Image (cartoon, grey):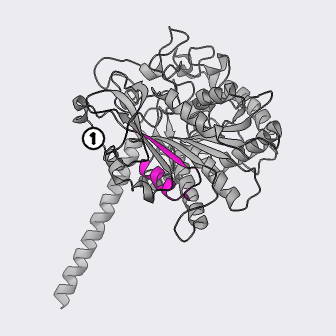
Amino acid sequence: MRPIRSILKHLSRAVGYTTLGAVLFGGWFYISLAQSQADLRPWHTVDLDGEYRGPGDDRVTDYTDYVALENELFAELHREVYESGDPWTQNRWSRYLRGGPQDSSTSNHAWNRSVELPADAPVGGALLLHGATDSPYSMRAVGELLHARGWHVVIPRYPGHGTAPVGLNTFDWKDIAEVAKLATAHLREQVGPDVPLVMVGYSTGCAIAVEYALAELEGEDRERIDHIINLSPAMGVSPIAAFAKTQGRLAKWLGVSKLAWTSIQPEYDPYKYNSFSVNAGDQVYELTVAVNERLARLADESGRVSGMPPVTSFSSIVDATVSVRATVAFHDRLAPSEGHELVIFDVDRTHNTADFLQSSDLAILDELPPPADRAYVLTVVGNLDHGTDQLAAWSDVPTREGAVAEPIDAAWPRGVYSLSHVAIPFRDHDPVYGLAPYGNSELPSLGNLQLRGERGLFVIDGDGRMRLRCNPFFDYMSQRIIDALDSSGR
């Protein structure tokens, strides 16, 4: 027995040492990979004191205070970043070149800041909530659409957003939720007590809107919302995001600043950060966990939640940022007969493209339950048939079998085969992200940036340039939004 015990002891010790060695090597390799990223710039490291620090920040008691503090913040941003002397700020395409083509502060409206579009006799109040790493600009098209129809529109800038990507290292989703609460109270004061309030969220903004409505449903003191519109909803993200917090802690413990970033990119986009921090991923993950915990607490014996405002969601069937299945699962948890809708944009399934497409999400339509088992109205937008790029809508069916197609007077643009997470809220002629931009023809559209040369030549991420940045079917979606909100009453 002793020889066997000795052998097992030495074997377990060897396995332990091997495992420890593998872990240490993996950690060293990962840290080395992080250190190989581009150098951090002032906009990744500067401490902006003018940023809102959450409910404990005694400088802010209401939304008016928040906007006033924001004005101080942007003055500080110009001193600390625009005038930092960093060579990249002198690059023609830097967002921090004062007066440069990507400097949003020189446009007719600084859409990196909180926006308010008042109406003289508002038909309602609309709070628009942008996504993580974004700015109020991402809600511009929808905001202008609603404002033109008589809605008083407020689009708050999130803490840590619209300024410098360093804000992604410290922002907390609870601070965003607090700003949304302050902005909603402000909006109610502006429009009066007798008109509806609605929320339109994009990506992370969708989860903020849903969390707000669930909190009200749980009895928290806040204004009632009459309708929620979701664009590319972030109702779930990759499970790997759960490890972001650990990586962030390692970055602090080891003093390896680059380890706090999953991507360090040149900042040439005037309204969206190109760099991405591990904290940003962690905060979106924590927000989705909080939403699901509220849903679980409020669910009845059938697992569904009653009393939510009607929710209308728009999603591409393929989404590399969030889980589309989580969006479907969220709608499955809502009570029936409460006006909920889900619109899914399919990929281009014509015969000449189908063989080149790969994604597990393409099977989502086949997984949907039949209409009798769903609590929402489903609309699928896709090819009229496999031989044409013309689009049609199928309502309340999981597949096209036996369904009647309703043409929507739209077609797939040449070279476009799906929507994307970042495309949904933008018009196809958006001046920054459109396929056919209007405005200054000398400025390149980031949605139609054509760079030809050898791979590895450009500092700009290649995958990002392939991603569709605008929605060719925005007119269809906007009409659906109008129809949904026209039905919102108090």
Instruction: Reply above or below: 383 against 204.
Output: above
Q: In terms of depth relative to the viewer, which is nearer, 376 or 244? A: 376
Q: Position of residue 258 (x, y in %)?
A: 48, 41
- Is residue 431 within the magenta segment? no
Instruction: Reply above or below: 398 against 6.
Output: above
Q: Position of residue 101 (x, y in %)?
A: 56, 14
- Residue at image location 49% in from the left, 23% down from the top: 433
Looking at the rendering, the stretch of residues picked out in magenta corresponds to 324-345
Look at the image and tell me whether residue 53 can be seen.
no
The disc labelled 1 sits on which kind of residue? Gln
Instruction: Reply above or below: 23 against 210.
Output: below
Element under label 1? loop
Q: How many marks?
A: 1
Left or right: residue 185 versus residue 271 is right
Split into 4 quadrants, where in the image is the N terminus?
Answer: bottom left
Q: Which residue is mark 1?
A: 358
- Residue at image location 47% in from the left, 45% down from the top: 259
Q: Identify the residue at the far bottom of this view.
A: 1
Q: Position of residue 211 (x, y in %)?
A: 62, 53
Q: In terms of depth relative to the viewer, which is nearer, 40 or 459? A: 459
Left or right: residue 70 versus residue 99 is right
- Residue at image location 56% in from the left, 65% down from the top: 296
Q: Quadrant of residue 290?
A: bottom right
